Image (cartoon, helix red, strand yellow):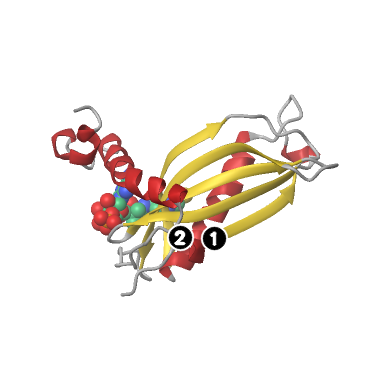
Amino acid sequence: MEAKTPKESLTVLTDLVLPGETNFLDNLFGGELLARMDRACSIAARRHSRQIVVTASVNHVAFSKPIPVGSVVTVEAKVSRAFKSSMETYVDVWTEDRLSGSRTKVNEGIYTFVAVDEVGKPVTIPQITPETDLEKKRFEGALRRKQLSLVLAGKLNAHDATALKALFN
Ligand SMILES: CC(C)(COP(=O)(O)OP(=O)(O)OC[C@H]1O[C@@H](n2cnc3c(N)ncnc32)[C@H](O)[C@@H]1OP(=O)(O)O)[C@@H](O)C(=O)NCCC(=O)NCCS
């Protein structure tokens, strides 16, 4: 199976924040943003694997800046690393200034998807060759994030999380 690049999975979703999607401070409701991020990541994972994909884990989400009602929000997802059947997908969230069009990064997240067959059994996927500096950095950190996620899920013994342990040596 030939390796692919992260940009082949790039998925960009742009949408408004409408009043029904906000919290009591008139900012985008966190759950609504999570859904948009999950949707973009899921399409990116599908583009990378060309298989049915399911969300296995939400590894990290940072709601660093509120997003006011009326904002134009762009969610950009790309697969950062592929393992055997699972892939790490990075998502960056941007808003754009109405007058200047300049973009501000407001949130980011990391999701893990697993490619499965028609009965939900994991299947092998193509590997990833990162190209840009940012893609290389995200690729390199992906193994320890996978190990952390597996340890937290009770699926990997912490003693076997070699890449994660290397952080502390
Ligand atoms: C995700 C799922 C297919 C994994 O099945 P499983 O029986 O644990 O399969 P495996 O143990 O063979 O794991 C498959 C891959 O997922 C990875 N994985 C499983 N759980 C993980 C987790 N919590 N974090 C990171 N990776 C995980 C494994 O490391 C493995 O990766 P690899 O093949 O790349 O090495 C299964 O748990 C599932 O169907 N979950 C429900 C998914 C779903 O419905 N999502 C939507 C929620 S509404």
The disc at residue 99 is: none
* Cβ atoms under marks 1 and 2 closer than 8 Å: yes
Foreground residue among 99 and 79 = 99
- Residue extending furthest right? 99
Q: Position of residue 27 (x, y in %)?
A: 72, 31
What amino acid does circle 1 point to? Leu
On screen, residue 137 versus residue 20, left or right, reads left
Image position of 77 with respect to 99: above or below: below
Q: Position of residue 42 (x, y in %)?
A: 50, 57
Amino acid type of disc 2? Answer: Pro
- At horizontal 40% and vertical 58% (from top left) the residue drawn is 130
Provide the residue designation for mark 2.
Answer: 6
Total residue callouts? 2
Tell me the quarter of the image containing the N terminus.
bottom left
Queried on whether the Cβ of the residue with tag 2 lies below 8 angstroms from ligand 1, the answer reads no
* Residue furthest to the front: 133
The residue closer to the viewer here, 70 or 138, is 138
Q: Quadrant of residue 99?
A: top right
Q: Residue 91 at what x, y percent from top left? A: 53, 47
Label 1, on which residue?
10
The residue sitting at 40% across, 46% down in the picture is: 138
Q: CA distance from mark 1 to mark 2?
A: 7 Å
Residue at the (47%, 65%) spot, across then down:
46
Look at the numbered disc 1 and give the secondary structure of its residue: loop
Q: Quadrant of the C terminus?
A: top left
Instruction: Please tell me which residue is depicted at 44% across the width and 71% down the height of the picture.
Output: 50
